[in-house]
Amino acid sequence: MPTVPLLRIGYVALTDAAPLLAADELGFFARQGFRVALSEEGAWAALRDKIALGALDGAHMLGPMPIALACGLGGVSARLSVGAGIGRNGNTVALSRALAEEAGADGRGALAPGAFAAAVRARAAAGRPPVRLAAVFPFSSQNYLLRHWLALGGLHPDRDLRLTVVPPSRAVRALADGEVDGFCAGEPWGSHAAAVGAGVVALATGDIWPDHPEKVLAFREGLPRATARATATP
């Protein structure tokens, strides 16, 4: 039997990375004849760069990332094969306690886009700094769904407030320190913000688009086929 290559698979510390972690811990990869090394990455940009440069063979990825890489968006290009979808929904929009109070978000139901828009306009009318919201990556469901939700309330995402990018693991700290007024990120970070008193969960992205696609398991192009040949019994 040929030597089985080591597959280096990256992930970002989110709830929907659990299938990979459980498969590794319970020996599912080994049972199927695979040698896998999981690599925790601190940000989606780092994971993207590593798979594009060949430092990773596969990854738990945001759904739009393989498309963005194929198009060379963000100045990084790579061709990937998507092996499976591994998540739907799973993100929350968390707001600072002050902004949540102004918008009427109490954490018990989905905040209406019109109510949030009214709070943003009230801040602007009072001459206060514009609201700052973060998503986890430019080419992500979090960014696109957040923009769609803002537009539903009549806001222009690039004119009426400030949108920025913060890695998931930094989102709660950025909110607590006042760097942003809210963020859209995968769980558990919205719930963590609420648990430590840094913010209020205003809605989930599933409230914007129920059962929307979220994460995928993707590999460098041609890798799954080559690995399957290596693991096959002659």
Image: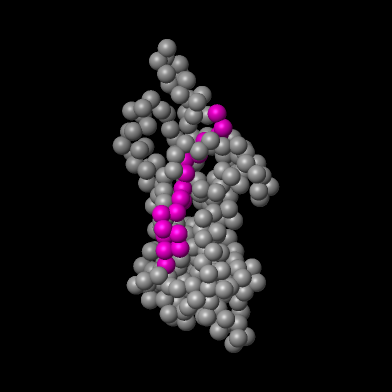
Q: How is the image coloured?
A: one colour
Q: Is residue 193 above or below residue 67?
A: below
* Residue found at the very far top of the displayed protein: 234
Residue in front for this viewpoint, 44 or 209: 209
Q: Position of residue 199 (x, y in %)?
A: 43, 71
Q: Is residue 219 magenta?
A: yes
For image coordinates 33% across by 33% down, the residue present is 27
| Location of residue 223 in the rendering, given as x and y in whole percent from the top left corner | 52, 29
Based on the displayed image, in which of its 4 quarters is residue 34 positioned?
top left
Furthest residue to the right? 75
- Pick out the residue farthest to the bottom: 126
218 is within the stretch colored magenta: yes
Residue 8 drawn at (x, y percent): 49, 35
Res 110 visible: yes
76 is higher (above) or lower (below) than 222: below
167 or 185, nearer to the observer = 185
Q: Position of residue 115 (x, y in %)?
A: 48, 78
Where is the C terminus found, in terms of image quarters? Answer: top left
What segment is highlighted magenta in the picture? 203-222
Query: What residue sits 61% from the left and 47% below the top?
Result: 68
Question: Horizontal placement of 98 versus 24: left or right?
Answer: right
The number of discs equals 0
Image position of 16 with respect to 178: above or below: above
Rendered residue at 48%/57% (across/down): 169
Camera-side residue: 48 or 37? Answer: 48
In the rendered image, the quadrant that contains the N terminus is top left
Towards the viewer: 192 or 210? 210
- Residue 178 appears anywhere in the view: no
